Every structure is written in structure tokens, then in C-alpha cells.
């Protein structure tokens, strides 16, 4: 799977294939193209997994438990052999009481 890295000032993210917003304003999936979504703060707990990617994620978790390594979402995503799927690593930056940023990974089926 290809990984595309983006830096944004907001969470507005549109599917390149359909033009539809990927998530609603409430954070719910808004496109059938969505296959998975992970948040950098809790990478071991995906926020959304489609049926096609769930067994792959479970196999990755099981192999990580055996090897006692940390969760590396990027390593998992690039290991998935789905040529029409694209993973977007989106880092959002802003200001609060200082600079803050958050990263999430969103997988779309662009077929």
C-alpha cells in the first residue's frame, strides 16, 4: 500500500476518488472507500476497521505480541498488499497554550 504524508491546519479531508468528505463533522465515516483509521495517541486501538483489513490488523498485533515490539502503524500499512488502497498519514498542527500537533492514518480504497 502506498503511504502519502500530509500536513494540514484542519481535519477537512476529502476522498481523492469521489470528492466526498471522508468523515462527517461528528467524526463518523462518510464514504464507503474508508478501510481503516488510526489515531497517533492510541495506535493500538483503530477508530475504524473495514472487514477486509481487520484480519490483517489482528495478525499484525499477534505477531507484535510475540516479538514484544511497539505498535508501528506505518510498518503495518506499508506491509499490506492492496494496490488500490492508499494510506494517508495526516499531521494536523495548531496552537493552544503552545504548538500542538496530532497525527492520524486513514486508509482509502481508491478503486
Image (cartoon, grey):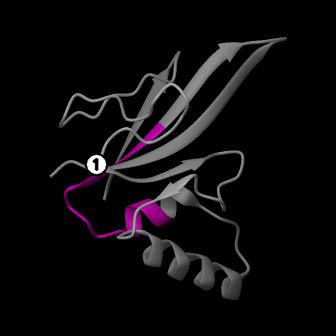
Percent across and percent down for residue 74 are 50, 56
Using the image, determine if residue 45 lies above or below residue 31. Answer: below
In the figure, residue 16 lies in which quadrant? Answer: top left
Q: Residue at x 48, y 25 (%)?
A: 7
Residue 18 horizontal side relative to residue 59, left or right:
left
List x then y, in percent, for residue 94.
65, 14
When the figure is inspected, residue 63 is found, relative to residue 98, above or below; the finding is below
Q: Residue at x 45, y 78 (%)?
A: 55
Left or right: 108 in relation to 29: left
At 19% from the left and 34% from the top, the residue drawn is 18
Residue that numbered label 1 is attached to? 33
Q: Is residue 15 left or right of residue 11?
A: left
Q: Secondary structure at mark 1?
A: loop
The residue furthest right is 97
**Quarter location, residue 45:** bottom right
Residue 79 lies within the magenta run:
yes
Q: Nearer the viewer, residue 103 or 27?
A: 27
Spot occupied by residue 15 in the image (x, y as percentages of width and height): 28, 34
Which residue is farthest left?
A: 111
Question: Of 13 and 89, which appears nearest the observer?
Answer: 13
Q: Position of residue 106 (x, y in %)?
A: 44, 45
From the image, which quarter does the N terminus lie in?
A: bottom left
Q: Label 1: how many residues lie within 10 Å, few (<14), some (14-19) or many (20+)? A: some
Total residue callouts = 1
Q: Which residues are magenta?
A: 76-89
Q: Is residue 63 magenta?
A: no
Amino acid at each position: 500500500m502506498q503511504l502519502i504524508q500530509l500536513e494540514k491546519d484542519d481535519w477537512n479531508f476529502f476522498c481523492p476518488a469521489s470528492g466526498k468528505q471522508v468523515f462527517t463533522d461528528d467524526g463518523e465515516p462518510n464514504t464507503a472507500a474508508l478501510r481503516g483509521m488510526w489515531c497517533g495517541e492510541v495506535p493500538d486501538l483503530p477508530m475504524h476497521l473495514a472487514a477486509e483489513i481487520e484480519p490483517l490488523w489482528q495478525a499484525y498485533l499477534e505477531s507484535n505480541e510475540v516479538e514484544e515490539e511497539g505498535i508501528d502503524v506505518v510498518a503495518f500499512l506499508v506491509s499490506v498488499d492492496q494496490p488500490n488502497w492508499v494510506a494517508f498519514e495526516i499531521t494536523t498542527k495548531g496552537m493552544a497554550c503552545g504548538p500542538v500537533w496530532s497525527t492520524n492514518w486513514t486508509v482509502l480504497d481508491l478503486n
